Amino acid sequence: MKQRIDGVTPPYEPEIDHALRKWMPPGAAQEPLMLFKVLVRHPELASRMQVLGEALLFHGRLSDADRELVIDRVAARSGCAYEWGIHMVVFAEAAGLSQEQATLTAVGDPDDPAWSARQTALLRAVDELHATSRLSDEAWGGLREHLDEQEILELLVLAGWYRTIAYVANGARIEPEPWALALPES
């Protein structure tokens, strides 16, 4: 299927170049991600999204491991091969996900023995949010055993944020980055 909104292409106008550099890590030598090149087609929206996205990804209260598990599960449950594949290459290993766990974010069950009790609670919460946009008392209690209120609030926003990213990537049919991993099929 063809990508529905083309990303901007080089040479970039100075304002676009500046906006794209804000999305990428400082000193990044690689070309900006296609998601970012699509989003900057709407500069005002992109600039607002960039602030929240950066805050959640790099400045949150959740540990790297918790954050990445939530992102990967949301991307997988949303069928967002684009985002899942990028996160597998860029963040999963550094966040401590094993190869088995990485695959299980896409095709596994929260009760799989590969997960700790904390990870099981996070996965159950993500799965319930994805299915119902709510958390049962049981899922809430599971989170409270491992997270404080601020961390839970952040988890809720993080899951919703990456669902939004999945909507953008899937809705615009953004083509996977050539170096990203493929989303396993269940």
Image (spheres, rainbow, N blue to C red):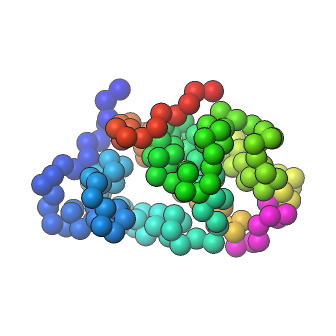
> Can residue 5 be spotted in the picture?
yes
* Residue 135 percent across, percent down from the top left: 77, 53
Relative to 81, 4 lies left or right: left
> Can residue 83 be spotted in the picture?
no
Residue closest to the eye, 122 or 44: 122
Tell me what residue is drawn at x 46 percent, y 37 percent: 181
Tell me what residue is drawn at x 64 percent, y 67 percent: 62
Q: Is residue 128 above or below residue 29?
A: above
Tell me what residue is drawn at x 69 percent, y 69 percent: 151
Tell me what residue is drawn at x 55 percent, y 51 percent: 93
Residue closest to the eye, 21 or 171: 21
The span shown in magenta is: 143-150
Relative to 42, 48 lies left or right: right
Q: In the image, is residue 141 part of the stretch drawn in magenta?
A: no
Q: Is residue 78 above or below residue 59?
A: above
* Residue 180 percent across, percent down from the top left: 42, 41
* Residue 28 percent across, percent down from the top left: 31, 62
* Residue 91 percent across, percent down from the top left: 51, 54
Q: In the image, is residue 146 part of the stretch drawn in magenta?
A: yes
Q: In which quadrant is the C terminus drawn? A: top right
Relative to 48, 61 lies left or right: right
